[in-house]
Image (cartoon, rainbow, N blue to C red):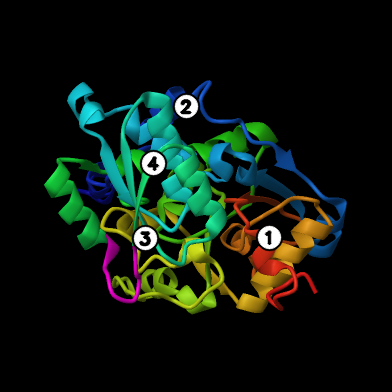
Amino acid sequence: MNKSDLKIAKENILPVKYSQIEAAAENLKNQAHITPIMTSRTVNELTNAEVFFKCENLQRTGSFKFRGAYNALCQLSAKQKQQGVITYSSGNHAQAIALAGKLLDIPTTIVMPRNAPEVKLAATRGYGAEIILYEPTETIREELAIQIAQEKDLVIIPPYDHSDIIAGQGTAAKELIEQVGGDLDLLLVCCGGGGLLSGSAIATKARLPNCQVIGVEPEQADDATKSFYSKTLHTVHNPDTIADGARTPSLGKLTFPLVLRYVDEMVTVSEDGILRTLHFLLSRLKIVVEPTGTLATAALLENIVTAPNKRVGVIISGGNLDIGDYLGTGKGFK
């Protein structure tokens, strides 16, 4: 077998292909928002680049997560839809599954940490989901979800390590490329469990093979970065980062090989950098972004990634910010 045949064989065993992202885009028509692209002369001047922000903070439920959730739930069998689904999430996937379930008339149960942002808890309840709270220092959420799923005969839809979830998330990058027209030299994507990053990287490499894809994590939750460079899966339990959507313990069994195959580089940003970027996006671009949603932007504005004279895509992943946590608490907005 020659090198070309080996490459084809390797790609054929990967869990998600671009054709699945194309199919997900069809499933999401008239369901997910086509979120806008924002540009900023100030950002372009600061970075000496042409920057395009994909505003998934303006997606249904306030994050990109709706794409994967709806794509996964709409493909369940009639029996599975009747039985219902369960997932575990700090908030954005929880809201996405809850709304997708409401739209598709599927009962939803969500395992959420007691310290999840109140804005995310309230929204999830508002979409009609049953919430089961757990103490993150005492309980492993995946184990609790498996136990409940077995007791109630529910389908588990994990937040990132699921082929239909990954394919749905990849539609964000596909849409971005179609909206900006022409080529992108670089795409920056935040990383928690790797669903958005791996899906976006697959879509980007299919459409723009020469575009570099960089994943961005918090310094204090750098399991994916360590995994990427060591080629060995690393785990970080309950990382102490303000970016709650990136508190995932590790990349998944599906997302890890996809990140290794399609992503070019991983970088990290500091907690102070996350807060500075959050403040900048609110005060200068006039958009509400949650800490995790700032990661890709922070890599650019904090000069961790530089791209002079390049066309840069940046995915702002979510906007479910509990503003009360940042007013008069010393966390930010000084």
* Secondary-structure class at tag 1: helix
Picture quarter containing residue 283?
Answer: bottom right
In the image, residue 76 lies at what x, y percent? 26, 29
Residues marked 3 and 4 touching at CB (< 8 Å): no
Picture quarter containing residue 190?
Answer: bottom right
Distance from the alpha carbon under mark 1 to that under mark 3: 36 Å
Residue 139: within the magenta? yes
Q: Nearer the viewer, mark 4 or mark 2?
A: 4
Where does label 4 land, which residue? Answer: 129
The residue that appears at 37% across and 25% down in the rendered structure is 104
Where does label 1 land, which residue? Answer: 323
* Secondary-structure class at tag 4: loop
Query: In terms of secondary structure, what is the magenta stretch mainly?
Result: loop
Residue 44: within the magenta? no
Q: Residues within 10 Å of mark 1 (few under 14, many from 20)?
A: few
In the image, residue 242 lies at what x, y percent? 56, 71
Return the disc, 2 or 3, that comes first in the chain's sequence.
Answer: 2
* Secondary-structure class at tag 2: helix
The residue that appears at 43% across and 48% down in the rendered structure is 93
Where does label 3 land, which residue? Answer: 260
* Secondary-structure class at tag 3: helix
Total marks in image:
4
Q: Magenta stretch: give its range.
A: 134-141
Return the disc, 1 or 4, that comes first in the chain's sequence.
Answer: 4
- Identify whether 79 is placed above or below 153: above
In the image, residue 149 lies at what x, y percent? 18, 47
Distance from the alpha carbon under mark 2 to that under mark 3: 27 Å
The residue that appears at 36% across and 71% down in the rendered structure is 227
Picture quarter containing residue 272?
Answer: bottom right
Please say whether residue 271 is visible from this viewpoint. Answer: yes
